Image: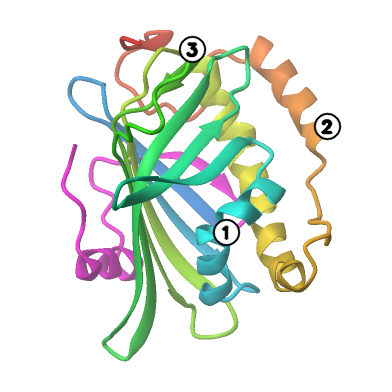
Amino acid sequence: MESSMTIEELIQEIDQPNLTSWKLFAKGSGVNVYRRTDDDHKLVQYKCFSHIPDVTPEIFYKVALDVEYRLVWDKYLKEAKEISDGEKNGVYWQVAMPLFIDNRDYTFVRDYGEYDIGGRHFYYAMTRTEPFQSIPPRKKIVRIETCQSQTLLCSDGAKGLKSVFLYIEEPRGNVPKTLWTWVAKFGVPMYSKLTHNACIAYPNWIKDKTTKVPTVAEDEIDETAAAAMITVENDLVNNDDDDDDEIQQEK
């Protein structure tokens, strides 16, 4: 896995994105996602730039770290809980997959903090998969063993935020190309809306945890995505040099 970026390098990405060797993968409201793979096509890497004009970086940061709240608003998160092995603390994450694909799960550690650099205030969060003896792999769920994310947030100079999000994963199991189609065409736009709704509702939810988080038209989006995946073959943004139908790794 590639080494993590420093805070200063992430700030540079926010101010002057480096997109050499990256290809546009998906776009949402205020979100651009770029993708690349390594030479062996084992590690898939994403770089996401966001601008949300009506959410402060502080609120987004708190939402990102709140495991309990994530289960409230994230329709694809089937299970999440804080875990520990002795003095090592982390999070268990199980993600529900579409298309009859086996669910994926993760055990990871987190690092996060706030920094004042160059007259600006930044919020940083990092996750990295690590094994936890207390959470062994489960049958019929693919355990992702190599995964890392970094997020850096700052003010947009008004009432919103700017951010960069870096994500690296070695997908395991058989991942059909139609899944990338679904993510690019429907997953990213819908997830952007779900995250935005979660941020807007968070201050009220903290006061009253019976508060309902506004949803996206989930059933309609899912039906449309499922229909499109039957008919669409190669019309997503082309990010791979090969035309293999699947990325195949050992389970």
Q: Which residue is mark 1?
A: 30
Q: Earlier in the sequence, mark 2 or mark 3?
A: 3
From the viewer's side, name the closer residue of 64 and 167.
64
Q: In the rendered view of the protein, which quadrant contains the N terminus?
A: top left
Instruction: Where is residue 7? Give x, y as percent.
Output: 24, 68
From the viewer's side, name the closer residue of 6 and 232.
6
Q: Which residues are magenta?
A: 1-29
- The answer to if 23 sits in the magenta stretch is yes
**Badge number at residue 220:** 2
Q: In the rendered view of the protein, which quadrant contains the C terminus?
A: top left
From the viewer's side, name the closer residue of 6 and 128.
128
Instruction: Where is residue 16? Give x, y as percent.
Output: 29, 66
Task: Tell me the kind of residue under disc 3.
Answer: Lys
Q: Is residue 235 visible?
A: no
Q: Nearer the viewer, mark 3 or mark 1?
A: 3
Q: Quick one: SS at disc 1?
A: loop
Say left or right for 234 vs 204: left
Task: Tell me the kind of residue under disc 1.
Answer: Gly
Spatial CA span between label 1 and label 2 = 22 Å
